[in-house]
Amino acid sequence: MGIGERAAARSLPQLLWSRSYERAWLRWDVLAGLTVAAMLVPQAMAYAELGDLPPSAGFRAALMALPVYALLGTSRHLGAGPEPGTIVLAAATAAALSNGDPDRFAALMAATGVLVGVVALLAGLLRLGFVAELLSKPVLVGYITGVGLTLLTSQFQTFTGVSIDADNPFVRVGELLGRLDQVDATTLFIGSGTLAVILGLKRFAPSWPGALIGLGTAMLAVALFDLDVATVGEIDAALPSFEVPGIEWADVADLIGPAAGVALIGYTDNILTARSIASRHRYEVDANRELVALGAMNVAGGFAGGFPMSSSASRSFVPSSIGSRSQLSSVVTLVAVVVLLVVGQSLLADIPRAGLAAVIVAAAFAVIDVDGFRGILRVSRIEAVLAVVTCLAVLSVDLLFGVIFAVVLSLLILVARVARPSDAILGRGEGLAGWVDVDDERAHHLDGLLVYRFDAPLFFANAEHFRERVQWAMDLNPGVESTIILDLEGVGSVDSTAVDHLHELVDELERAELHVGIARANPQVIEVLERAGLLGPGSVVANHPTINAAVAAFEEQARGEADD
Protein backbone atom coordinates (compact mmCIF):
# COMPACT_ATOMS: atom_id res chain seq x y z
CA MET A 1 0.00 0.00 0.00
CA GLY A 2 1.47 3.34 -1.06
CA ILE A 3 1.66 6.54 0.95
CA GLY A 4 -1.49 7.94 -0.65
CA GLU A 5 -3.40 4.72 -0.06
CA ARG A 6 -2.31 4.59 3.59
CA ALA A 7 -3.45 8.20 4.09
CA ALA A 8 -6.81 7.37 2.52
CA ALA A 9 -7.16 4.31 4.71
CA ARG A 10 -6.54 6.40 7.82
CA SER A 11 -9.26 8.84 6.72
CA LEU A 12 -11.65 6.16 5.47
CA PRO A 13 -10.79 3.08 7.57
CA GLN A 14 -13.21 0.74 5.80
CA LEU A 15 -11.20 1.05 2.60
CA LEU A 16 -9.04 -1.56 4.30
CA TRP A 17 -11.73 -4.25 4.15
CA SER A 18 -12.93 -3.20 0.68
CA ARG A 19 -9.40 -3.62 -0.75
CA SER A 20 -8.67 -6.94 0.96
CA TYR A 21 -12.14 -8.45 0.79
CA GLU A 22 -12.30 -12.21 0.32
CA ARG A 23 -15.10 -13.85 -1.64
CA ALA A 24 -15.60 -16.47 1.09
CA TRP A 25 -16.78 -13.71 3.44
CA LEU A 26 -19.71 -12.66 1.21
CA ARG A 27 -22.16 -15.37 2.30
CA TRP A 28 -21.77 -14.58 5.98
CA ASP A 29 -21.85 -10.80 5.48
CA VAL A 30 -25.07 -11.04 3.45
CA LEU A 31 -26.69 -13.35 6.03
CA ALA A 32 -25.64 -11.05 8.87
CA GLY A 33 -26.86 -7.97 6.99
CA LEU A 34 -30.31 -9.45 6.36
CA THR A 35 -30.58 -10.61 9.95
CA VAL A 36 -29.65 -7.17 11.31
CA ALA A 37 -32.17 -5.56 8.92
CA ALA A 38 -34.87 -7.77 10.41
CA MET A 39 -33.84 -6.51 13.85
CA LEU A 40 -33.37 -2.88 12.85
CA VAL A 41 -36.78 -2.28 11.27
CA PRO A 42 -38.83 -2.84 14.43
CA GLN A 43 -36.18 -1.27 16.64
CA ALA A 44 -36.02 1.90 14.55
CA MET A 45 -39.77 2.27 14.81
CA ALA A 46 -39.92 1.41 18.50
CA TYR A 47 -37.09 3.71 19.53
CA ALA A 48 -38.56 6.61 17.55
CA GLU A 49 -41.86 6.04 19.36
CA LEU A 50 -39.93 5.96 22.61
CA GLY A 51 -38.68 9.47 21.84
CA ASP A 52 -42.20 10.72 20.95
CA LEU A 53 -41.25 10.86 17.26
CA PRO A 54 -42.95 9.21 14.28
CA PRO A 55 -41.46 5.91 13.09
CA SER A 56 -40.24 7.64 9.94
CA ALA A 57 -37.69 9.54 12.07
CA GLY A 58 -36.22 6.23 13.16
CA PHE A 59 -35.77 5.12 9.57
CA ARG A 60 -34.23 8.43 8.51
CA ALA A 61 -31.72 8.17 11.33
CA ALA A 62 -30.89 4.52 10.62
CA LEU A 63 -30.47 5.03 6.87
CA MET A 64 -27.83 7.68 7.52
CA ALA A 65 -25.99 5.82 10.28
CA LEU A 66 -25.48 2.63 8.27
CA PRO A 67 -23.49 3.98 5.29
CA VAL A 68 -21.61 6.65 7.25
CA TYR A 69 -20.36 4.24 9.89
CA ALA A 70 -19.58 1.58 7.28
CA LEU A 71 -17.30 4.14 5.60
CA LEU A 72 -15.68 5.77 8.64
CA GLY A 73 -15.86 3.32 11.54
CA THR A 74 -13.08 0.95 12.53
CA SER A 75 -15.22 -1.85 13.97
CA ARG A 76 -16.19 -4.61 11.54
CA HIS A 77 -19.31 -5.51 13.49
CA LEU A 78 -20.70 -2.46 15.35
CA GLY A 79 -24.44 -2.05 14.74
CA ALA A 80 -24.57 1.73 14.43
CA GLY A 81 -27.93 3.48 14.50
CA PRO A 82 -30.90 4.09 16.82
CA GLU A 83 -30.43 3.12 20.44
CA PRO A 84 -32.87 3.74 23.32
CA GLY A 85 -30.57 5.36 25.90
CA THR A 86 -29.44 8.26 23.72
CA ILE A 87 -32.90 9.05 22.37
CA VAL A 88 -34.47 9.07 25.84
CA LEU A 89 -31.78 11.41 27.11
CA ALA A 90 -32.20 13.76 24.13
CA ALA A 91 -36.00 13.62 24.33
CA ALA A 92 -35.99 14.73 27.97
CA THR A 93 -34.23 17.96 27.01
CA ALA A 94 -36.22 18.55 23.83
CA ALA A 95 -39.53 18.06 25.65
CA ALA A 96 -38.63 20.73 28.20
CA LEU A 97 -37.88 23.25 25.43
CA SER A 98 -40.65 22.45 22.95
CA ASN A 99 -43.62 23.56 25.08
CA GLY A 100 -45.74 20.76 23.65
CA ASP A 101 -45.23 21.74 20.00
CA PRO A 102 -44.55 18.47 18.09
CA ASP A 103 -42.92 20.23 15.12
CA ARG A 104 -40.58 22.17 17.40
CA PHE A 105 -39.88 18.97 19.36
CA ALA A 106 -38.86 17.16 16.17
CA ALA A 107 -36.62 20.09 15.16
CA LEU A 108 -34.97 20.12 18.59
CA MET A 109 -34.33 16.38 18.41
CA ALA A 110 -32.75 16.72 14.97
CA ALA A 111 -30.68 19.69 16.15
CA THR A 112 -29.52 17.70 19.17
CA GLY A 113 -28.34 15.00 16.80
CA VAL A 114 -26.32 17.55 14.82
CA LEU A 115 -24.79 18.99 18.00
CA VAL A 116 -23.94 15.51 19.31
CA GLY A 117 -22.16 14.95 16.02
CA VAL A 118 -20.26 18.22 16.21
CA VAL A 119 -19.12 17.50 19.78
CA ALA A 120 -17.98 14.00 18.83
CA LEU A 121 -16.19 15.23 15.69
CA LEU A 122 -14.31 17.89 17.63
CA ALA A 123 -13.40 15.38 20.32
CA GLY A 124 -12.13 12.97 17.68
CA LEU A 125 -10.05 15.63 15.96
CA LEU A 126 -8.60 16.62 19.36
CA ARG A 127 -7.86 12.92 20.03
CA LEU A 128 -9.97 12.75 23.16
CA GLY A 129 -10.88 9.11 22.70
CA PHE A 130 -9.48 8.30 26.13
CA VAL A 131 -12.39 10.08 27.89
CA ALA A 132 -14.52 6.93 27.86
CA GLU A 133 -11.95 5.31 30.13
CA LEU A 134 -12.73 7.90 32.82
CA LEU A 135 -16.07 6.22 33.45
CA SER A 136 -15.52 3.41 35.93
CA LYS A 137 -17.36 0.10 35.62
CA PRO A 138 -19.58 0.66 38.71
CA VAL A 139 -20.74 4.00 37.32
CA LEU A 140 -21.41 2.54 33.87
CA VAL A 141 -23.31 -0.43 35.30
CA GLY A 142 -25.37 1.84 37.53
CA TYR A 143 -26.10 4.29 34.73
CA ILE A 144 -27.10 1.74 32.11
CA THR A 145 -29.30 -0.10 34.61
CA GLY A 146 -31.01 3.18 35.47
CA VAL A 147 -31.61 3.75 31.77
CA GLY A 148 -33.03 0.23 31.43
CA LEU A 149 -35.46 0.75 34.31
CA THR A 150 -36.47 4.12 32.85
CA LEU A 151 -37.17 2.46 29.50
CA LEU A 152 -39.16 -0.29 31.18
CA THR A 153 -41.44 2.07 33.10
CA SER A 154 -41.86 4.36 30.07
CA GLN A 155 -43.78 1.58 28.28
CA PHE A 156 -46.31 0.87 31.02
CA GLN A 157 -49.07 2.81 29.28
CA THR A 158 -48.53 1.45 25.77
CA PHE A 159 -47.99 -2.09 27.03
CA THR A 160 -51.05 -2.29 29.30
CA GLY A 161 -53.43 0.46 28.19
CA VAL A 162 -53.34 2.05 31.67
CA SER A 163 -53.20 5.85 31.68
CA ILE A 164 -49.81 6.88 33.11
CA ASP A 165 -49.17 10.59 33.67
CA ALA A 166 -45.88 10.68 35.58
CA ASP A 167 -42.37 11.12 34.21
CA ASN A 168 -40.54 9.76 37.24
CA PRO A 169 -40.05 5.95 37.11
CA PHE A 170 -40.92 5.46 40.78
CA VAL A 171 -44.17 7.41 40.40
CA ARG A 172 -45.00 5.47 37.24
CA VAL A 173 -44.81 2.22 39.20
CA GLY A 174 -47.15 3.68 41.82
CA GLU A 175 -49.64 4.85 39.20
CA LEU A 176 -49.65 1.45 37.48
CA LEU A 177 -50.25 -0.41 40.75
CA GLY A 178 -53.02 2.03 41.68
CA ARG A 179 -54.81 1.73 38.34
CA LEU A 180 -54.69 -2.00 37.64
CA ASP A 181 -58.45 -1.94 37.09
CA GLN A 182 -57.79 0.12 33.93
CA VAL A 183 -55.66 -2.57 32.24
CA ASP A 184 -56.89 -3.27 28.70
CA ALA A 185 -56.85 -7.04 28.30
CA THR A 186 -56.39 -6.97 24.53
CA THR A 187 -53.49 -4.54 24.66
CA LEU A 188 -51.82 -6.51 27.46
CA PHE A 189 -52.34 -9.74 25.51
CA ILE A 190 -50.61 -8.36 22.40
CA GLY A 191 -47.80 -6.76 24.40
CA SER A 192 -47.06 -9.74 26.64
CA GLY A 193 -47.43 -12.21 23.76
CA THR A 194 -44.97 -10.28 21.61
CA LEU A 195 -42.55 -10.02 24.53
CA ALA A 196 -42.81 -13.77 25.19
CA VAL A 197 -41.90 -14.52 21.57
CA ILE A 198 -38.93 -12.10 21.63
CA LEU A 199 -37.54 -13.42 24.92
CA GLY A 200 -38.20 -17.03 23.99
CA LEU A 201 -36.33 -16.74 20.71
CA LYS A 202 -33.50 -14.89 22.44
CA ARG A 203 -33.19 -17.81 24.85
CA PHE A 204 -33.58 -20.74 22.45
CA ALA A 205 -32.74 -19.30 19.00
CA PRO A 206 -30.60 -16.20 19.60
CA SER A 207 -29.56 -15.85 15.95
CA TRP A 208 -33.20 -15.46 14.83
CA PRO A 209 -34.70 -11.94 14.43
CA GLY A 210 -36.88 -12.15 17.54
CA ALA A 211 -38.31 -8.61 17.32
CA LEU A 212 -39.42 -9.07 13.72
CA ILE A 213 -40.95 -12.50 14.38
CA GLY A 214 -42.65 -11.21 17.51
CA LEU A 215 -44.20 -8.27 15.68
CA GLY A 216 -45.22 -10.52 12.80
CA THR A 217 -46.95 -12.83 15.27
CA ALA A 218 -48.72 -9.86 16.87
CA MET A 219 -49.93 -8.58 13.48
CA LEU A 220 -51.18 -12.05 12.61
CA ALA A 221 -53.07 -12.34 15.90
CA VAL A 222 -54.71 -8.93 15.40
CA ALA A 223 -55.79 -9.87 11.87
CA LEU A 224 -57.05 -13.38 12.71
CA PHE A 225 -59.06 -12.38 15.77
CA ASP A 226 -60.00 -8.89 14.54
CA LEU A 227 -58.60 -7.32 17.70
CA ASP A 228 -59.18 -3.65 18.46
CA VAL A 229 -55.71 -2.30 19.30
CA ALA A 230 -53.78 0.86 18.43
CA THR A 231 -51.45 0.49 15.45
CA VAL A 232 -48.54 2.52 14.10
CA GLY A 233 -50.51 3.98 11.20
CA GLU A 234 -49.22 5.45 7.97
CA ILE A 235 -45.49 6.17 7.77
CA ASP A 236 -44.80 9.36 5.82
CA ALA A 237 -41.55 10.33 4.12
CA ALA A 238 -39.46 7.58 5.68
CA LEU A 239 -36.56 8.10 3.30
CA PRO A 240 -34.14 10.91 4.29
CA SER A 241 -34.65 14.44 3.01
CA PHE A 242 -31.95 16.88 4.10
CA GLU A 243 -32.71 20.22 5.74
CA VAL A 244 -31.36 22.42 8.51
CA PRO A 245 -33.32 21.94 11.77
CA GLY A 246 -35.57 24.94 12.37
CA ILE A 247 -34.30 26.22 15.71
CA GLU A 248 -33.02 29.53 17.08
CA TRP A 249 -29.44 30.27 18.13
CA ALA A 250 -30.68 30.53 21.71
CA ASP A 251 -31.72 26.88 21.48
CA VAL A 252 -28.14 25.90 20.65
CA ALA A 253 -26.99 27.21 24.03
CA ASP A 254 -29.69 25.14 25.76
CA LEU A 255 -28.88 22.01 23.79
CA ILE A 256 -25.08 21.96 23.74
CA GLY A 257 -24.69 20.70 27.32
CA PRO A 258 -27.13 17.82 26.96
CA ALA A 259 -25.62 17.07 23.54
CA ALA A 260 -22.19 16.70 25.15
CA GLY A 261 -23.69 14.28 27.68
CA VAL A 262 -25.36 12.25 24.92
CA ALA A 263 -22.09 12.20 22.97
CA LEU A 264 -20.20 10.90 26.01
CA ILE A 265 -22.70 8.14 26.73
CA GLY A 266 -23.08 7.21 23.06
CA TYR A 267 -19.33 7.07 22.54
CA THR A 268 -18.76 5.06 25.72
CA ASP A 269 -21.39 2.55 24.60
CA ASN A 270 -19.84 2.33 21.13
CA ILE A 271 -16.24 1.89 22.19
CA LEU A 272 -16.98 -0.68 24.90
CA THR A 273 -19.10 -2.77 22.54
CA ALA A 274 -16.68 -2.41 19.63
CA ARG A 275 -13.62 -3.33 21.70
CA SER A 276 -15.38 -6.30 23.28
CA ILE A 277 -16.15 -7.78 19.85
CA ALA A 278 -12.79 -6.79 18.34
CA SER A 279 -10.93 -8.65 21.08
CA ARG A 280 -12.79 -11.83 20.15
CA HIS A 281 -11.93 -11.48 16.47
CA ARG A 282 -8.39 -10.17 17.02
CA TYR A 283 -8.47 -6.80 15.32
CA GLU A 284 -7.97 -3.26 16.58
CA VAL A 285 -10.51 -0.47 17.11
CA ASP A 286 -9.25 3.13 16.92
CA ALA A 287 -10.85 5.14 19.74
CA ASN A 288 -10.42 8.52 18.05
CA ARG A 289 -11.69 7.26 14.69
CA GLU A 290 -14.75 5.92 16.50
CA LEU A 291 -15.44 9.43 17.77
CA VAL A 292 -15.21 10.77 14.23
CA ALA A 293 -17.54 8.05 12.93
CA LEU A 294 -20.04 8.70 15.73
CA GLY A 295 -19.92 12.42 15.00
CA ALA A 296 -20.34 12.09 11.26
CA MET A 297 -23.32 9.75 11.47
CA ASN A 298 -25.08 12.00 14.01
CA VAL A 299 -24.55 15.12 11.90
CA ALA A 300 -25.91 13.29 8.86
CA GLY A 301 -28.82 11.84 10.83
CA GLY A 302 -29.70 15.22 12.34
CA PHE A 303 -29.81 16.99 8.99
CA ALA A 304 -31.91 14.10 7.63
CA GLY A 305 -34.59 14.69 10.28
CA GLY A 306 -33.53 11.97 12.69
CA PHE A 307 -32.28 12.06 16.27
CA PRO A 308 -29.11 11.26 18.28
CA MET A 309 -27.73 7.75 17.75
CA SER A 310 -24.97 5.47 18.92
CA SER A 311 -25.14 1.68 18.53
CA SER A 312 -27.08 -1.38 19.60
CA ALA A 313 -25.30 -4.17 21.41
CA SER A 314 -27.73 -6.75 20.02
CA ARG A 315 -27.23 -5.53 16.43
CA SER A 316 -23.46 -5.72 17.03
CA PHE A 317 -23.11 -9.14 18.62
CA VAL A 318 -25.51 -10.88 16.23
CA PRO A 319 -23.38 -10.36 13.07
CA SER A 320 -20.34 -11.30 15.11
CA SER A 321 -21.95 -14.59 16.14
CA ILE A 322 -23.15 -15.32 12.59
CA GLY A 323 -19.64 -14.94 11.20
CA SER A 324 -19.69 -11.54 9.50
CA ARG A 325 -16.20 -10.35 8.60
CA SER A 326 -16.70 -6.72 7.53
CA GLN A 327 -19.00 -3.72 7.45
CA LEU A 328 -20.35 -4.92 4.11
CA SER A 329 -23.06 -6.44 6.29
CA SER A 330 -24.19 -2.88 7.11
CA VAL A 331 -24.42 -2.10 3.40
CA VAL A 332 -26.64 -5.18 2.96
CA THR A 333 -28.76 -4.01 5.91
CA LEU A 334 -29.10 -0.58 4.30
CA VAL A 335 -30.28 -2.02 0.98
CA ALA A 336 -32.75 -4.36 2.70
CA VAL A 337 -34.31 -1.58 4.78
CA VAL A 338 -34.63 0.73 1.75
CA VAL A 339 -36.36 -2.00 -0.24
CA LEU A 340 -38.77 -2.63 2.62
CA LEU A 341 -39.61 1.06 2.92
CA VAL A 342 -40.22 1.39 -0.80
CA VAL A 343 -42.46 -1.66 -1.20
CA GLY A 344 -43.74 -2.45 2.29
CA GLN A 345 -44.78 0.76 4.07
CA SER A 346 -48.44 -0.30 4.20
CA LEU A 347 -47.42 -3.50 6.00
CA LEU A 348 -45.50 -1.54 8.62
CA ALA A 349 -48.54 0.65 9.27
CA ASP A 350 -50.43 -2.33 10.74
CA ILE A 351 -47.88 -3.06 13.49
CA PRO A 352 -49.58 -2.88 16.94
CA ARG A 353 -48.13 -0.22 19.23
CA ALA A 354 -48.24 -2.68 22.11
CA GLY A 355 -45.92 -4.89 20.05
CA LEU A 356 -43.46 -2.04 19.62
CA ALA A 357 -43.66 -1.46 23.39
CA ALA A 358 -42.67 -5.11 23.83
CA VAL A 359 -39.58 -4.50 21.66
CA ILE A 360 -38.56 -1.66 23.99
CA VAL A 361 -39.31 -3.70 27.12
CA ALA A 362 -37.10 -6.49 25.75
CA ALA A 363 -34.34 -3.94 25.14
CA ALA A 364 -34.78 -2.69 28.71
CA PHE A 365 -34.39 -6.22 30.09
CA ALA A 366 -31.22 -6.60 28.04
CA VAL A 367 -29.52 -3.51 29.52
CA ILE A 368 -30.57 -4.00 33.16
CA ASP A 369 -27.22 -5.40 34.26
CA VAL A 370 -27.93 -7.62 37.25
CA ASP A 371 -24.85 -9.75 36.54
CA GLY A 372 -22.76 -6.57 36.47
CA PHE A 373 -23.93 -5.66 39.99
CA ARG A 374 -23.15 -9.18 41.22
CA GLY A 375 -19.67 -9.12 39.71
CA ILE A 376 -18.88 -5.74 41.27
CA LEU A 377 -20.21 -6.86 44.65
CA ARG A 378 -17.87 -9.86 44.60
CA VAL A 379 -14.91 -7.55 44.08
CA SER A 380 -15.81 -4.49 46.18
CA ARG A 381 -18.79 -3.55 48.35
CA ILE A 382 -17.89 0.13 48.07
CA GLU A 383 -17.98 -0.01 44.28
CA ALA A 384 -21.30 -1.88 44.43
CA VAL A 385 -22.71 0.97 46.53
CA LEU A 386 -21.44 3.46 43.95
CA ALA A 387 -23.24 1.52 41.19
CA VAL A 388 -26.49 1.58 43.16
CA VAL A 389 -26.15 5.29 43.94
CA THR A 390 -25.61 6.09 40.26
CA CYS A 391 -28.65 4.03 39.29
CA LEU A 392 -30.79 5.84 41.87
CA ALA A 393 -29.53 9.22 40.62
CA VAL A 394 -30.73 8.35 37.11
CA LEU A 395 -34.11 7.16 38.38
CA SER A 396 -34.70 9.89 40.96
CA VAL A 397 -33.86 12.97 38.90
CA ASP A 398 -33.35 12.46 35.16
CA LEU A 399 -30.98 10.93 32.64
CA LEU A 400 -29.02 14.12 32.02
CA PHE A 401 -28.35 14.47 35.73
CA GLY A 402 -27.36 10.81 35.71
CA VAL A 403 -24.80 11.49 32.97
CA ILE A 404 -23.31 14.45 34.84
CA PHE A 405 -23.41 12.55 38.11
CA ALA A 406 -21.70 9.55 36.50
CA VAL A 407 -18.88 11.66 35.09
CA VAL A 408 -18.33 13.60 38.32
CA LEU A 409 -18.50 10.44 40.41
CA SER A 410 -16.01 8.68 38.16
CA LEU A 411 -13.57 11.57 38.47
CA LEU A 412 -14.03 11.69 42.24
CA ILE A 413 -13.30 7.96 42.45
CA LEU A 414 -10.20 8.45 40.35
CA VAL A 415 -8.96 11.36 42.48
CA ALA A 416 -9.74 9.50 45.71
CA ARG A 417 -7.73 6.48 44.62
CA VAL A 418 -4.78 8.54 43.47
CA ALA A 419 -4.96 10.74 46.56
CA ARG A 420 -4.66 7.71 48.84
CA PRO A 421 -2.67 5.15 46.82
CA SER A 422 -0.93 2.03 48.00
CA ASP A 423 2.63 2.38 49.35
CA ALA A 424 5.18 0.18 51.06
CA ILE A 425 8.40 -0.09 53.00
CA LEU A 426 10.80 -2.23 50.98
CA GLY A 427 13.42 -4.74 52.02
CA ARG A 428 16.06 -6.64 50.08
CA GLY A 429 14.58 -9.87 48.74
CA GLU A 430 16.60 -12.87 49.89
CA GLY A 431 17.49 -14.92 46.82
CA LEU A 432 15.96 -12.24 44.59
CA ALA A 433 17.56 -9.58 42.42
CA GLY A 434 15.24 -6.84 43.64
CA TRP A 435 13.42 -5.31 46.59
CA VAL A 436 10.05 -6.41 47.96
CA ASP A 437 7.47 -5.29 50.50
CA VAL A 438 8.69 -5.88 54.05
CA ASP A 439 5.54 -7.91 54.69
CA ASP A 440 7.02 -10.54 52.37
CA GLU A 441 8.83 -13.21 54.39
CA ARG A 442 11.77 -13.01 51.94
CA ALA A 443 12.36 -9.31 52.73
CA HIS A 444 15.55 -8.47 54.63
CA HIS A 445 15.95 -5.18 56.51
CA LEU A 446 19.21 -3.20 56.38
CA ASP A 447 20.06 -1.30 59.55
CA GLY A 448 20.13 2.46 59.10
CA LEU A 449 18.23 2.35 55.77
CA LEU A 450 14.61 3.09 54.84
CA VAL A 451 13.42 2.36 51.30
CA TYR A 452 9.92 3.76 50.77
CA ARG A 453 7.73 3.33 47.66
CA PHE A 454 4.72 5.53 46.71
CA ASP A 455 2.43 4.23 43.95
CA ALA A 456 0.85 7.30 42.36
CA PRO A 457 1.67 10.62 40.71
CA LEU A 458 2.52 13.31 43.25
CA PHE A 459 0.09 16.22 43.00
CA PHE A 460 -1.90 18.64 45.08
CA ALA A 461 -4.39 16.03 46.34
CA ASN A 462 -1.81 13.66 47.84
CA ALA A 463 1.35 15.71 48.46
CA GLU A 464 0.64 16.22 52.17
CA HIS A 465 -0.41 12.59 52.46
CA PHE A 466 2.95 11.60 50.93
CA ARG A 467 4.85 13.50 53.65
CA GLU A 468 2.71 11.90 56.35
CA ARG A 469 3.34 8.43 54.94
CA VAL A 470 7.10 9.00 54.85
CA GLN A 471 6.93 9.87 58.55
CA TRP A 472 4.78 6.75 59.13
CA ALA A 473 7.40 4.65 57.37
CA MET A 474 10.17 6.13 59.52
CA ASP A 475 8.22 5.36 62.70
CA LEU A 476 7.48 1.79 61.57
CA ASN A 477 10.89 0.95 60.13
CA PRO A 478 13.12 -0.93 62.65
CA GLY A 479 16.15 0.86 64.07
CA VAL A 480 17.31 4.40 63.48
CA GLU A 481 17.67 5.56 59.89
CA SER A 482 20.63 7.41 58.55
CA THR A 483 19.51 7.27 54.92
CA ILE A 484 16.06 7.40 53.29
CA ILE A 485 15.60 6.29 49.70
CA LEU A 486 12.37 7.30 47.97
CA ASP A 487 11.46 4.79 45.27
CA LEU A 488 9.67 6.92 42.64
CA GLU A 489 9.03 4.25 40.03
CA GLY A 490 5.27 4.57 40.60
CA VAL A 491 5.37 8.38 40.58
CA GLY A 492 4.58 9.20 36.98
CA SER A 493 4.51 12.99 37.41
CA VAL A 494 5.02 15.76 39.97
CA ASP A 495 3.14 19.08 40.12
CA SER A 496 4.14 22.40 41.72
CA THR A 497 2.28 21.71 44.98
CA ALA A 498 4.10 18.39 45.36
CA VAL A 499 7.42 20.13 44.65
CA ASP A 500 6.79 22.51 47.56
CA HIS A 501 6.03 19.59 49.88
CA LEU A 502 9.13 17.74 48.72
CA HIS A 503 11.24 20.83 49.50
CA GLU A 504 9.79 20.93 53.02
CA LEU A 505 10.29 17.19 53.49
CA VAL A 506 13.92 17.33 52.37
CA ASP A 507 14.57 20.31 54.67
CA GLU A 508 13.07 18.41 57.62
CA LEU A 509 15.16 15.32 56.91
CA GLU A 510 18.32 17.38 56.42
CA ARG A 511 17.80 19.10 59.77
CA ALA A 512 17.49 15.62 61.30
CA GLU A 513 20.89 14.82 59.71
CA LEU A 514 19.43 12.17 57.41
CA HIS A 515 20.68 11.49 53.90
CA VAL A 516 18.02 11.53 51.17
CA GLY A 517 18.09 9.81 47.81
CA ILE A 518 15.60 9.00 45.06
CA ALA A 519 15.60 5.92 42.86
CA ARG A 520 13.98 4.85 39.57
CA ALA A 521 12.44 8.25 38.78
CA ASN A 522 11.40 8.68 35.15
CA PRO A 523 13.00 11.41 32.98
CA GLN A 524 9.99 13.73 33.23
CA VAL A 525 10.04 13.65 37.04
CA ILE A 526 13.83 14.14 37.10
CA GLU A 527 13.49 17.17 34.82
CA VAL A 528 10.87 18.77 37.09
CA LEU A 529 12.95 18.12 40.21
CA GLU A 530 16.05 19.56 38.56
CA ARG A 531 14.18 22.73 37.56
CA ALA A 532 12.91 23.00 41.14
CA GLY A 533 16.43 22.68 42.56
CA LEU A 534 15.79 19.40 44.31
CA LEU A 535 18.28 17.59 42.08
CA GLY A 536 21.49 18.71 40.45
CA PRO A 537 24.43 20.87 41.58
CA GLY A 538 24.15 22.03 45.18
CA SER A 539 21.29 19.66 46.02
CA VAL A 540 21.46 17.34 49.02
CA VAL A 541 19.25 14.78 47.27
CA ALA A 542 21.10 12.01 45.41
CA ASN A 543 19.59 10.57 42.24
CA HIS A 544 20.03 6.84 41.50
CA PRO A 545 18.84 4.83 38.47
CA THR A 546 17.94 1.76 40.59
CA ILE A 547 17.31 0.84 44.21
CA ASN A 548 20.35 -1.43 44.17
CA ALA A 549 22.50 1.49 43.03
CA ALA A 550 21.12 3.65 45.84
CA VAL A 551 21.72 0.89 48.39
CA ALA A 552 25.27 0.36 47.09
CA ALA A 553 25.93 4.07 47.68
CA PHE A 554 24.47 3.76 51.19
CA GLU A 555 26.65 0.74 52.00
CA GLU A 556 29.78 2.41 50.67
CA GLN A 557 29.03 5.49 52.77
CA ALA A 558 28.43 3.28 55.83
CA ARG A 559 31.79 1.54 55.31
CA GLY A 560 33.53 4.90 54.98
CA GLU A 561 31.98 6.15 58.21
CA ALA A 562 33.00 2.89 59.96
CA ASP A 563 36.61 3.30 58.78
CA ASP A 564 36.69 6.82 60.16
Image (tube, rainbow, N blue to C red):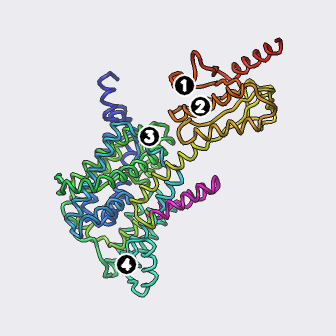
Q: Helix, strand, or loop for circle 3?
A: helix
28 above or below 519? Answer: below
The percent coordinates of residue 429 (x first, y second) are 77, 28
Q: Amino acid at mark 4?
A: Ile
Q: Is residue 275 left or right of residue 43?
A: right
The residue located at (22%, 65%) in the rendering is 235
Q: Nearer the viewer, residue 354 or 118?
A: 118
Foreground mark, 2 or 4, reads: 2
Nearest to N terminus: mark 1 or mark 4? 4
For label 1, the SS is: helix
Q: Which residue is mark 1?
A: 529
Q: Is residue 198 magenta?
A: no
Q: Residues within 10 Å of mark 3 (few under 14, many from 20)?
A: few
Residue 316 in percent (x, y) is at 42, 50
Marks 2 and 1: which is nearer the front?
A: 2
Q: Secondary structure at mark 2?
A: helix
Q: CA distance from mark 2 to mark 1?
A: 9 Å
First in sequence: mark 1 vs mark 3: 3
Magenta segment: 364-393
Q: Name above or below for residue 178 compared with residue 91.
A: below
| Residue at far bottom of view | 181
Q: Amino acid at mark 3?
A: Phe
Q: Which residue is under mark 4?
A: 164
Query: Which residue was labeled with disc 2?
Result: 502
Please tell me the numbered disc located at residue 130.
3
